[in-house]
Image: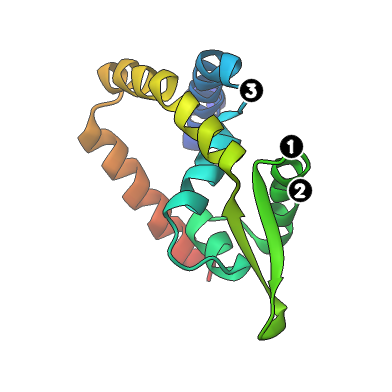
Amino acid sequence: MLAASCAGLAIRQAARRVTQFYEDALQDSGLSVAQLGLMAVIATNEDDRMAALAARAGLDPSTLSRNLRGLERDGLIEIASVEKDLRRRAVWLTESGLRRLQGALPAWKATQTRIAELFPADLLQRIAVAGEKLAERED
């Protein structure tokens, strides 16, 4: 009964299955769904500071740093201190990173279409809003 009625368990299981669905689709790109998402945030984030990136990605700074290290190691992003304030670090995609992101988009779009058949946009919006409400309660 607990397993069948627990929102936490049901959502975790669904998240794992959705993640695996994306991972399978993105396999040829060499990117995980987490890497693709983080690179997309980097590509579209006007504020390139680490703190702004962490907030936009919904990650704590240490998790963000850990995730960025792999992308940096693979030459997909660059991280550098800003000359005016050496404590501030900026992040951006390299040309290789941009090409890899663009190359993964067709598989991502096809997967999005298939997911939309199972998870209508209004359901995803409600889940996102509920997640935000939970995050607000943590503060």
Can residue 5 be seen at all in this image of the molecule? no
| Residue plotted at (69% across, 59% down) | 79
Q: Amino acid at mark 2?
A: Arg
Q: Nearer the N terminus, badge 2 or badge 1?
A: 2
Q: Nearer the N terminus, badge 3 or badge 2?
A: 3
| Residue plotted at (59% across, 69% down) | 51
Q: Residues within 10 Å of mark 1 (few under 14, many from 20)?
A: few
User: Residue 65: where, in percent of width, then height?
Assistant: 73, 56
| Residue plotted at (51% across, 40% down) | 37
Mark 1–mark 3 distance (CA, rounded to whole Å): 10 Å
Q: Residues within 10 Å of mark 3 (few under 14, many from 20)?
A: some
Residue labelled with disc 1: 74
Mark 2 secondary-structure assignment? helix
Tags 3 and 2 in contact by the CB under 8 Å rule?
A: no
Q: Amino acid at mark 3?
A: Gly
User: Which corner quadrant of the image does residue 64 belong to?
Assistant: bottom right
Locate residue 91 relative to residue 5 in the image: left or right. Answer: right
Mark 1 secondary-structure assignment? loop
Can residue 107 be seen at all in this image of the molecule? yes
User: Residue 29: where, in percent of width, then height?
Assistant: 57, 21
| Residue plotted at (48% across, 59% down) | 56
Query: 60 or 35, which lies in front?
Result: 35
The answer to whether residue 11 is above or below residue 132 is: above
User: Residue 48: where, in percent of width, then height?
Assistant: 54, 65
Mark 3 secondary-structure assignment? loop
Q: Which mark is residue 69?
A: 2
Residue labelled with disc 3: 30
The answer to whether residue 101 is above or below residue 115 is: below
Which of label 2 and label 1 is nearer to you?
A: 1
User: Which corner quadrant of the image does residue 111 belong to?
Assistant: top left
